[in-house]
């Protein structure tokens, strides 16, 4: 017996718990089906035609956002001279419950892949010079936004506390920053690591560094003697690249990890020069959090 109950009572209890668990999943689903999907409520109701309202995580004095995917969208808009209004936020979310999202001509678009596609379609842009270049660009884009991104998350686990303390430096009293750095860093590193391991695999620290270095080797090989990754002029994939490396390398100079060591080595000097060239070409002197 347990708590005065026999095994049948325990079985009944487990059964009831199971029913409640199932109900907690099924009921919201049924309610949503009955009510239907709510129409998206625009953040900017008095929008201007053909202006991209970009909702993004704030940045720092050395990077326009703390999210590589937000930087990618800003870079793509700048590259194609599309008028943009950047809206920094921590609380707003798009239809997919994530940042970035944009509002354009009264419609909301979420997820950086979809956003780039929609902007390309709406403004009738040419993201790449030809179909073969587009195919290569797409493959490299997915390497950067998935494999390289998640390896970077794992590689910088020891500096997550520093990143979080910088993020909230102007929002909490200074005496709380060490607490944010310690507890927030531990929680953040665990959460980011779990996400990354689910995406690319569960690796030891030395294996993460090995794979991250290999990504840089491949990217530098793809770059070759060209000015930009897949062409002599910047394309959509260069926006993705400056998003990933702009956030990881430039955003918080004090949060140094293995990527800094790699990019500052002689071996990867061509890749570092490419990043500087791309940053300057697309952002000029405005690769920072200011409007």
Image (spheres, helix red, strand yellow):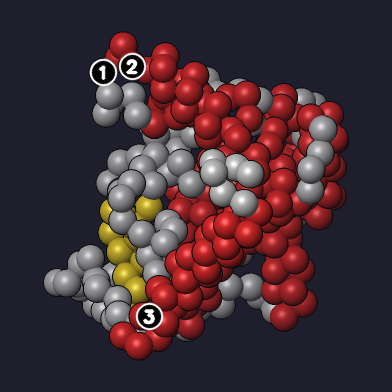
Residue ID for mark 3: 32
Dot 2 lies on which element?
A: helix
CA separation in Å, label 2 and label 1 = 6 Å
Residue ID for mark 2: 176
Image position, residue 140 (x, y; %): 73, 60
**What is the residue that sits farthest to the top in this orientation?**
175
CA separation in Å, label 3 and label 1 = 42 Å
Give the quadrant of residue 232.
bottom right
Q: Residue 228, relative to residue 220: is it above or below?
A: below
Residue ID for mark 1: 173
Q: Residue 134, relative to residue 167: is it above or below?
A: below
Residue 50 appears in the figure: no
Q: Earlier in the sequence, mark 3 or mark 1?
A: 3
Q: Residue 237, relative to residue 290: is it above or below?
A: below
Q: For the residues carrying marks 3 and 1, which lies nearer the camera in this image?
A: 3
Q: For the residues carrying marks 2 and 3, which lies nearer the camera in this image?
A: 3
Q: Residue 133, relative to residue 257: is it above or below?
A: below
Is the residue under label 1 in contact with that under label 2 (CB below 8 Å)?
Answer: yes
Circle 3 packing at 10 Å, graded few (<14), some (14-19), many (20+), is: few
CA separation in Å, label 2 and label 3 = 41 Å
Question: Is residue 98 rendered to the left or right of residue 232?
Answer: left
Dot 1 lies on which element?
A: loop
Dot 3 lies on which element?
A: helix
């Amino acid at each position: 017996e347990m708590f005065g109950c026999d095994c049948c009572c325990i079985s009944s209890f487990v059964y009831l718990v199971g029913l409640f668990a199932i109900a907690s999943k099924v009921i919201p689903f049924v309610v949503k089906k009955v009510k239907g999907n709510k129409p998206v409520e625009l953040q900017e109701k008095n929008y201007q035609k053909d202006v991209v309202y970009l909702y993004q995580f704030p940045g720092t004095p050395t990077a326009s956002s703390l999210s590589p995917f937000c930087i990618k969208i800003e870079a793509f808009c700048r590259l194609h001279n599309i008028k943009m209004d950047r809206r920094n936020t921590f609380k707003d979310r798009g239809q997919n419950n994530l940042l970035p999202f944009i509002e354009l001509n009264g419609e909301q678009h979420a997820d950086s892949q979809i956003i780039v596609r929609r902007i390309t379609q709406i403004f009738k842009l040419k993201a790449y010079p030809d179909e073969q270049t587009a195919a290569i660009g797409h493959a490299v884009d997915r390497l950067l936004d998935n494999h390289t991104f998640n390896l970077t998350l794992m590689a910088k686990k020891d500096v997550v506390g520093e990143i979080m303390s910088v993020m909230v430096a102007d929002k909490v009293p200074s005496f709380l920053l060490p607490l944010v750095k310690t507890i927030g860093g531990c929680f953040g590193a665990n959460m980011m690591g779990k996400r990354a391991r689910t995406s690319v695999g569960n690796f030891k620290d030395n294996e993460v560094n090995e794979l991250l270095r290999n990504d840089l080797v491949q990217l530098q090989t793809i770059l070759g003697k060209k000015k930009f990754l897949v062409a002599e002029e910047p394309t959509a994939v260069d926006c993705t690249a400056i998003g990933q490396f702009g956030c990881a390398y430039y955003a918080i100079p004090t949060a140094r990890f293995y990527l800094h060591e790699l990019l500052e080595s002689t071996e990867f000097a061509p890749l570092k020069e490419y990043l500087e060239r791309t940053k300057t070409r697309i952002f000029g002197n405005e690769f920072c959090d200011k409007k």
